[in-house]
């Protein structure tokens, strides 16, 4: 149940809706893509099933998300409402704000590669003003992704067979460091933490590194 701060303030009323633990992380998952209940459980390591159910119910009641039938018509998935989707901008702002907190790396924290789909574009979008049209493969462990850059922005998704201008192999902490501008490509190469195949100049341009 959402608790009131009893304050006539936009921030207070917003926090009454999304300020409880796990709420913004649920929104993060749904900004990446609509998801079924079991997909949300997998994408939110550490959440209890009853907690997820409670948070989904509260966010649905508040109008942040909705349930809908999948294309097959036999399963329910959760998706953000248009109002809920407006949380993208504040969440991307928090991701950029978190840069000093991310420098120490994951330590013992869980990590899922799909989280980069929200984080990397958020970090690049306000920092890289000259955007070449390019597609870069990102190999993070066993997860192959592609980063597509265009004049309209940046987008990360699973590799779809498109021609790649270059491929970057690195642990997620170093991908985030490049995207945030906290690590240059030259320093990363010198440290031996990043490998690049293909046109390195494209990587330099896309990451402004």
Image (cartoon, helix red, strand yellow):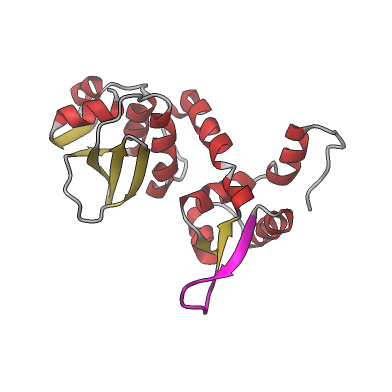
Identity of the residue drawn at 25% across and 56% down: 160
Bounds of the magenta segment: 65-76
Residue furthest out toward the left:
198
Identity of the residue drawn at 24% across and 20% down: 187
Residue furthest out toward the front:
151
Residue 47 visible at all = yes
Identity of the residue drawn at 32% across and 28% down: 178
Q: Quadrant of residue 7?
A: top right
Q: Does residue 191 appear left or right of residue 23 in this picture?
A: left
Residue furthest out toward the right:
6
State the residue in front, 189 or 156. Answer: 156
Residue 22 visible at all = no
Identity of the residue drawn at 20% across and 52% down: 162
Image coordinates for residue 135, horizontal then vertical, percent: 23, 42
Q: Does residue 53 appear left or right of residue 184 in this picture?
A: right
Q: Quadrant of residue 153?
A: top left
Q: Does residue 186 appear left or right of residue 148 in this picture?
A: left
State the residue in front, 186 or 152. Answer: 152
């Amino acid at each position: 149940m959402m608790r009131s701060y009893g304050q006539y303030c936009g921030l207070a009323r917003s926090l009454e809706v999304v300020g409880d633990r796990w709420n913004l992380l649920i929104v993060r998952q749904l900004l990446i893509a609509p998801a079924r209940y079991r997909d949300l459980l997998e994408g939110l390591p550490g959440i209890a099933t009853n907690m997820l159910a409670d948070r989904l119910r509260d966010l649905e009641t508040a109008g942040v998300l909705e349930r809908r039938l999948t294309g097959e018509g036999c399963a329910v998935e959760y998706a953000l409402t248009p109002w809920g989707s407006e949380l993208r901008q504040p969440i991307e702002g928090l991701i950029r704000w978190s840069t000093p907190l991310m420098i120490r790396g994951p330590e013992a924290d869980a990590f899922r590669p799909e989280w980069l789909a929200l984080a990397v574009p958020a970090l690049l979008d306000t920092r890289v003003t000259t955007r070449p049209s390019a597609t870069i493969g990102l190999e993070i462990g066993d997860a192959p992704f592609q980063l597509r850059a265009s004049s309209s922005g940046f987008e990360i998704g699973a590799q779809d067979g498109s021609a790649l201008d270059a491929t970057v192999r690195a642990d997620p902490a170093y991908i985030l460091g490049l995207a945030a501008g906290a690590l240059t490509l030259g320093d990363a190469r010198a440290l031996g933490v990043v490998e690049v195949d293909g046109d390195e100049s494209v990587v330099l341009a896309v990451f402004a590194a």
